[in-house]
Image (spheres, rainbow, N blue to C red):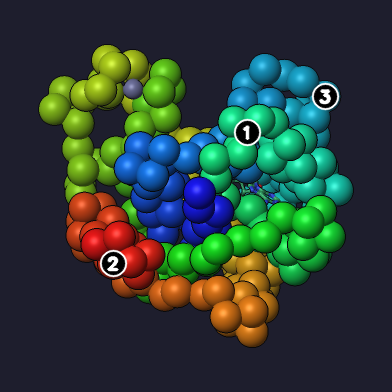
Amino acid sequence: MVRLLLLGGPGSGKGTQAKRLVDLLSVIQVSTGDMLREAKAAGTPLGMQAAEHMNAGTLVPDEIVNGIVQQRLARPDCGNGFILDGYPRTLGQAQALEEAGVTLDGVILVDVPDDLLVERLTGRQTCSACGQMYHRTYQPPAQEGRCDRCGGELVTRSDDNEATVRERLRVYRDQTEPLIGWYVAKGLLKRVDGQGAPDEVLKRILTQLGRG
Ligand code: ADP
Ligand code: ZN
């Protein structure tokens, strides 16, 4: 049973790593970004509200996100453990999680310098069917515009344009970076170099978890 949080800037690769860890550790990925994008695609009232914030690169209000995550964590499939990806993202969210009685075994900070984050985000492509991620330069699909895994269409996320990316980085520095100190103080933070190929980063994470 493992309950992890992956922390890192937009484009740090935490989503990619979360997906790999899910397969290796047989746990559930809880990605607020994915859940909010699903709500947005489904056109639910919550999704419409979230979309405004996401397109601007700002955060969806804590009350909304806290509610979604607590409902998700209460489902039985989370009983074997989970990987939180993109939540908590503010001190208010971290507090809410603690007040909900959720304890974490570790927090992995996927550390990537800012200039590399921008480069990664602006070349990123995602499969519209299965969520697999690609990069025009670093990790191109075998056939342009098609997912290697499922053949689905590759799309650029609407918030991966340069203006929104810059705003997301600013928001990360202002609102999410303070979580690093919060989890250091709790003795939970493990820092991992997020540069290099996804496989290398995964190895570093597994080493930090004592599963290398
Ligand atoms: P990235 O980490 O690459 O920015 P995510 O998929 O995690 O991508 O998040 C995309 C957007 O979804 C964020 O910019 C924000 O608007 C919204 N979002 C995701 N998670 C949260 C959260 N925990 N709190 C508030 N907003 C969130
Ligand atoms: Zn796919």
Judging by the rendered image, the residue that carries numbered circle 1 is 35
Judging by the rendered image, the residue that carries numbered circle 3 is 45
Residue at 52% x, 66% y is 106
Residue at 66% x, 30% y is 76
Cα–Cα span, label 3 and label 1: 14 Å
First in sequence: mark 1 vs mark 2? 1
Give the quarter of the image for residue 67: top right
Which of pointers 1 and 2 indicates the residue nearer the eye?
2
Give the quarter of the image for residue 78: top right
Using the image, determine if residue 117 lies above or below residue 81: below
x, y percent for residue 68: 75, 38
Taking the image as drawn, is residue 37 in sight?
no
Badge 3 local density, few (<14 within 10 Å), some, or many (20+)? few
Cα–Cα span, label 1 and label 2: 29 Å
At mark 2, the secondary structure is helix
State if disc 1 and disc 3 touch (CB < 8 Å): no
Using the image, determine if residue 6 lies above or below residue 76: below
Label disc, if present, on residue 207 of the rendered structure: 2
x, y percent for residue 73: 69, 40
At mark 3, the secondary structure is helix
Badge 2 local density, few (<14 within 10 Å), some, or many (20+)? few
Horizontal side, residue 143 vs residue 10: left or right: left
Which of pointers 3 and 1 indicates the residue nearer the eye?
1
Amino acid of disc 2: Thr
